[in-house]
Amino acid sequence: MDLFKSMELEGDEQNPEIKNIEKVRCLIIGSGPAGYTAAIYAARANLKPVLYTGMQMGGQLTTTTEVDNFPGYPDGITGPEMMEQFKKQAERFGTDIRFGLATGADFSGTPLRVTFDENTRIIADTVIIATGATAKYLGIEAETKYAGMGVSACATCDGFFYRQKDVAVVGGGDTAAEEATYLAGMCKKVYLIVRRSVLRASKAMQERVMKTPNIEILWEHQAIDLFGENGVEGAILVKKKGTLEEETVRIKIDGFFLAIGHTPNSDVFKKYIETDPAGYIKTIPGTSKTKVPGVFAAGDVQDPHYRQAVTAAGSGCMAAIDAERYLAG
Ligand SMILES: Cc1cc2nc3c(=O)[nH]c(=O)nc-3n(C[C@H](O)[C@H](O)[C@H](O)COP(=O)(O)OP(=O)(O)OC[C@H]3O[C@@H](n4cnc5c(N)ncnc54)[C@H](O)[C@@H]3O)c2cc1C
């Protein structure tokens, strides 16, 4: 299929901001497990993929130390090392990997158009969006100070390191309730720090939390700081902030888990791609296809449920196969 036949470049050529225009068969946006896996499959299928890394080359896993749950690494591996291996494997089959940020997209017709760094226009037969999702943090300085030293935004990923220890989970929604219950299965004690006097979680999840003996809910508490010598040893909370009953509370914990949501990196594509209210890209169930022909989504950007490296990689594989079949007509 040659989608370029109907292409009109005049508009782009007249835009003084656009310095480079290039046609590709398969454009992959993002360099996490989803993007690199899509690249491995697309390159081996001879789609000659071009992959733009975004600002975080290697994705979220480059911010963590040990990855113990990705199959194939019986002794574990550090996140940055693992992502370097993903990159090498994608390069081995000829993926063209470039540093650049998608700053605009036009999926109003074919071929598809994506702008990088405001000055490069890629005109593509197929686009695989693998831009991930960013965990939300409270915005307190201590979260940065103790990053990887007791602060985590992923209980499934890091809970194992806190077996038989005391931890706190921040949040009042379904994710927080799920993460608290998950951690309660391996930790000695779990504090659930809830800003309000009620949980937003579903009734079923609330019941599970209430029934779990080693979860203690700290209602109307807000975390304002963490302390510890070589890692988190405790948190400072304010109870009933802004009321006459306001008081400062200190709890001793080894791990501080944020569960206040994620922001999918889908803004650039939102004009054309359907998303759910939180911004996750909607795909046709069981596939990586979006409603726009030729545009596929993989990894955390389309996954409100699992958000794991292995599921991201799996969906990257799906996206490359879907793209290859789309091109084959
Ligand atoms: C601290 C931490 C520890 C974790 N530990 C584990 C673990 O032990 N095991 C596990 O399975 N999972 C773990 N996870 C979750 C795992 O990292 C994610 O599920 C996985 O990285 C998602 O992969 P992805 O490819 O969808 O997106 P990401 O890894 O988020 O990659 C997204 C990519 O998109 C790029 N990008 C974003 N916007 C743009 C744009 N506009 N233009 C171009 N590129 C863009 C970014 O630069 C990045 O390269 C952890 C997450 C964190 C934060």
Image (cartoon, rainbow, N blue to C red):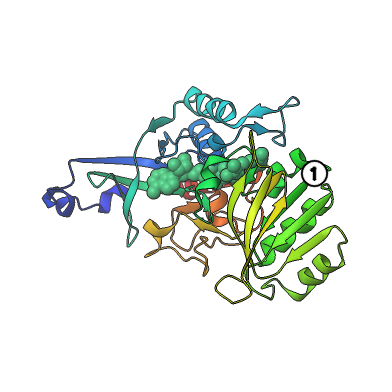
Mark 1 secondary-structure assignment: loop
228 lies left or right of 28: right
Residue 280 position in % (x across, y down): 52, 61
Viewer-closest of 222 and 84: 222
Q: Is residue 321 visible?
A: no
Q: Which residue position is annotated with label 1?
A: 165
Location of residue 294 with respect to 68 vertically, above or below: below
Residue behind label 1 places its C-beta within 8 angstroms of ligand 1: no
Task: Point out residue 113 in the picture as x, y percentages from the top left corner.
Answer: 31, 51
Asked where in the image residue 30 lies, by quadrant, the reply is: top left
Residue at the spot 57% in from the left edge and 40% down from the top edge: 147
Query: What residue is shown at x 42% (from left), y 38% (from top)?
Result: 53
Left or right: 319 with respect to 178?
Answer: left
User: Which quadrant of the view contains residue 223?
Assistant: bottom right
Q: Ligand 1 is found in which quarter of the picture?
A: top right
Q: Is residue 35 depicted above or below 93 in this figure?
A: below
Residue 140 x/y as whole percent: 51, 52
Callout 1 amino acid: Lys
Q: In the rendered image, is residue 99 in sight?
A: yes
Q: Nearer the viewer, residue 127 or 251?
A: 251
Looking at the image, residue 93 sits to the left or right of residue 164; the answer is left
**Label 1 CA crowd tier, 10 Å (few <14, some 14–19, many 20+):** some
Name above or below for residue 127 compared with residue 290: above
Q: How many numbered badges does the structure rendering display?
A: 1
